[in-house]
Amino acid sequence: MPRSSRRRVAPQLALLASALLFSAAGASTGCASIINRDPNLRWWAFKTYGADRICPEILKASVPLKLSGENSPTIGRYYPASCSTSINEERRVVVVNIGGSGYAYMATAKRVGFTLNVSPEYAFDFYMHEDGNWVWGKLARVAAGPDFRTTNVENKVVDLAAGLTPAGGMANLFGGQVVSGFLSKGFTVVESDEGKEFSLGILPPGKRPFRPIEVDSSDEAYTFSNETADIYSNQQDFLGPFEIADEDQRLSIKGTLAGGAVDFVIVSKQTGDLWRQSYQSGAPVSGPPGPIMGQSMVQAGPFNRKFQLNPGVYYVIVDNSASTGQASPLFSLPNPLFDASVRLTYLAQLIEE
């Protein structure tokens, strides 16, 4: 496996820490059976070796947002900026206090910027299966929030018509259907010979997460994300952050693009955060506020891109506008209720060469 997979847990996979304890120790079948049967041992392992790893990993992650089921395309992302945990020993749950911001796209409102603070309370458990380790974060309750506040709506006609306030209709829509829906499903993390995978919902032992692109089990690459995203005309999507740990590692992005050409623009996390915050605020779509570390135009159809980057943390911005790069969406008359889009199905991996 790539060295980075040993040095850092996958961004959304912080809940896996307890299972890693046993897999790293080479637990035998007999040991696994004992652990599976003993809830006291499972809880002790998690609170001792896993709880304090949740926030450092969550803060490296972004959360894809969808309006419907798990198999639907991503229409926005949430980026945690603050995180803390507390353990309730009596109830055997962990409260995770999360604060951050993000963006999403809706057909009528277009680009929507928002902030979100929420404190979900999770009960953790795991099962050592013959095919790997299944780790669950099961929502016990929402201790506080979600406090979802819109900060900007691109379509001002909808903004005024909806009478948008911090507790307005659109906030309820995203807070209820997207954020609360995401939290209430809980999480499943699977660690196996094929790597580490994350999925919404509670998957039973043996069942694997949905993957738009099938990953070869013999492939030693580390998978960051495997998803489908819709990027609308004159909009952007900020993939990542992705961490490059060693000089011999490469960032690989492959998949298919439908609907037109886009630009991949790679910037450091520091530059990307500034760029994303401007985008979320409702500022006109623009180029990066700092140096570009890599760039490539992607035409419709299959693609495979590899980027050589120095060790660090990076965003890959998918630009479907004329603001940067060579690609730009086809001209169309302004429509306050609809924008054309491209559909990106991609696999982002860390590879060694």
Image (cartoon, rainbow, N blue to C red):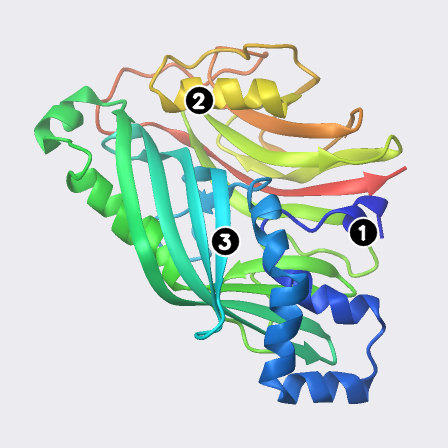
**Disc 1 element:** helix
Residue that badge 3 annotates: 85
Report the residue at 58% width, 83% height from top.
39
Report the residue at 17% width, 26% height from top.
159
**Cα–Cα span, label 1 and label 2:** 31 Å
Task: Indicate the position of residue 56 as horizontal and vertical percent values.
Answer: 61, 45
291 lies left or right of 351: left
Asked which quadrant contains residue 206, the reply is bottom right
- Front: mark 1 or 3: 3
Q: Is residue 224 visible?
A: yes
- Front: mark 3 or 2: 3
- Going by the numbered disc 1, the residue's amino acid type is Arg
Mark 3 in CB contact with mark 2 (< 8 angstroms): no
Disc on the earlier residue, 3 or 2: 3
Report the residue at 60% width, 66% height from top.
47
Residue that badge 1 annotates: 6
**Disc 2 element:** helix
Crowding around mark 3 (Cα neighbors within 10 Å: few <14, some 14 to 19, many 20+) is: some
Asked if residue 7 is positioned above or below residue 107 in the image, the reply reads below
- Going by the numbered disc 3, the residue's amino acid type is Thr
Asked if residue 224 is positioned above or below residue 124 in the image, the reply reads above
